[in-house]
Amino acid sequence: MSAPKEGRHGVSSHYFDAQPAAAHRPGLVRVVLPDVYLELETDSGVFSPGRLDPGTRLLLEEAPPPADGDLLDLGCGYGPVACVLASRAPQATVWAVDVNERARDLTARNARHAGLANVRTATPDDPAVPGALAAIWSNPPIRVGKAALHGMLRTWLGRLRPGGHACLVVGRNLGADSLHSWLEEDGWPVARIAARAGYRLLLVTNDPERTRQVSHDTSR
Ligand SMILES: C[S@@+](CC[C@H](N)C(=O)[O-])C[C@H]1O[C@@H](n2cnc3c(N)ncnc32)[C@H](O)[C@@H]1O
């Protein structure tokens, strides 16, 4: 796990704190993709407030198109993944889940400003989040530590509906390959569907044939 950052007043803070102590520092990130353009508000105390994270960009550029139904952005930050998903799948409901209250507030505001009425923000234990998810897209919080990360992934992957899939982007130097191995050891069929600039995009399902099929369709 990374060392906490010391804030100006000696208060330590992480991007995954429930209520970040860092003083507000509003910013703006432009998400420019071939099919979507969004201007999103950011702030200190959330993940990558200065630019679209390159791992997140890989996820948004290479993951297979989202299905309709209930989609989960696990660890939404200021909302780039949730807002792109919501824009690409207007019939879907996108659940933007994060432990960080500032992140959830930014995501809700960004979705509202972009006219995306199909985004719902929630805490991880919010009972409103449906039990059966069509897809999970995530740039997961590796820095919470292995045990917490594994527990979180096990919980949410277990909520994928049959035929659903998860797309997880992880930095190679943050342990993408060992996470890939752990997922397989834990019984999840996994395929690496893209790799760029030190990031890996992993596709996970609950059915080996489905993993083969989606990764084949994605690589065409
Ligand atoms: C790597 S950041 C990705 C943020 C955003 N999706 C992006 O791409 O910019 C991971 C996010 O997971 C959140 N997080 C940490 N622990 C979590 C948990 N147990 N459940 C849900 N989200 C969590 C963090 O607060 C952080 O916003």
Image: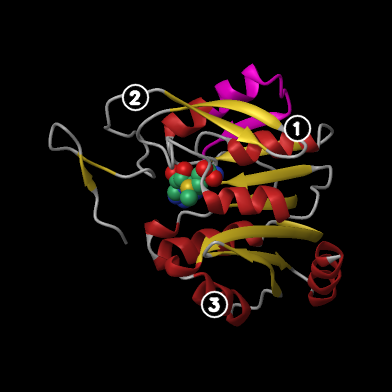
Foreground of the two, 177 or 95: 177
Q: Is residue 84 above or below residue 168?
A: above
Distance from label 2 to label 1 (Cα)? 27 Å
Circle 2: residue type: Arg
Q: Quadrant of residue 186?
A: bottom right
Question: Eyeballing the image, is 42 above or below 142?
Answer: above
Query: What residue is pinned by disc 1?
Result: 87
In this rendering, which labeled residue sits more in front, label 3 or label 2? 2
Amino acid type, residue under disc 3 in the picture: Trp
Point out the stretch of residues depicted in magenta.
107-123
- The amino acid pointed to by label 1 is Ser
Give the mark nearer the N terminus: 2 vs 1: 2
Picture quarter containing residue 70? top right
Q: Quadrant of residue 35?
A: top right
Is disc 2 surrounded by few (<14), some (14 to 19) or many (20+) residues within 10 Å? few
Q: What percent of the width, then of the height, locates residue 151?
A: 49, 63
Q: Quadrant of the N terminus?
A: bottom left
* Residue 87 visible at all: yes
Taking 1 as reference, is 66 left or right? right
The percent position of residue 26, horizontal first and vertical second, equals 40, 22
Location of residue 136 with respect to 23 vertically, above or below: below
Q: Residue 23, position in %: x, y?
A: 27, 26
Q: Which residue is mark 3?
A: 182
| Mark with earlier residue (1, 3) | 1
Label 3 element class: helix
Q: Residue at x 59, y 37 (%)?
A: 80
CB at disc 3 and ligand 1 closer than 8 Å: no
Task: Report whether the residue tagged 2 is closer than 8 Å to ligand 1.
Answer: no
x then y, percent, for residue 38:
64, 28
Queried whether the magenta region covers residue 109, the answer comes back as yes
Question: Is 167 on the left-hand or right-hand side of 51?
Answer: right
